[in-house]
Amino acid sequence: MPNHGRPPTGGREKEGEAMSLEAMEQVTKVEEALRQRKSEAAAQAKQLVAQAEREGKLLVIAPRTTLGVSRTERDVEKLRLLWAEGYQSAVDRMEEIRDYLRG
């Protein structure tokens, strides 16, 4: 990348200096690759959990839906509703949970 007579910055842009189109494209490619790896790892983890559950090695207790609640939700009422959903799910599956714990 030409520096147009400016001294080298060691790869760091000066404050207020725009990033080149080439550099932005590289950043975009790296971000996409990271998202893809994260997505693949999550899918693999889900498969492993599902397989272990089918084999009876573990019992998954999870909400049927997130009710649109994000991981960083701050709305206390939404969090209470999700908690109540999870609590009711556990109550509904109590016999299954007891059987699993008994082995």
Image (cartoon, rainbow, N blue to C red):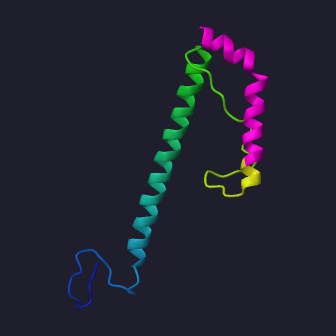
> Image quadrant of residue 88?
top right
Depth check: 94 or 45 in front?
Answer: 94
In this rendering, the answer to whether 6 lies above or below 65 is below
* Residue at 61% over, 51% down: 71
Residue 38: image location, x then y, percent? 49, 46
Residue 6: image location, x then y, percent? 23, 90
* Residue at 50% over, 49% down: 36
Which residues are drawn in magenta?
A: 80-103
Residue 90: image location, x then y, percent? 73, 27
In this rendering, the answer to whether 75 lies above or below 5 is above
Instruction: Answer whether residue 8 is magenta in the image.
Output: no
* Residue 79 visible within the image: yes
Residue 93 falls left or right of residue 8 = right
* Residue at 26% over, 85% down: 3
In this rendering, the answer to whether 55 lies above or below 64 is above
> Image quadrant of residue 98?
top right
Depth check: 25 or 87 in front?
Answer: 87
Query: Quick one: which residue is furthest to the left in this view?
Result: 7
Query: Quick one: which residue is furthest to the bottom in this view?
Result: 5
For the N terminus, the quadrant is bottom left
For the C terminus, the quadrant is top right
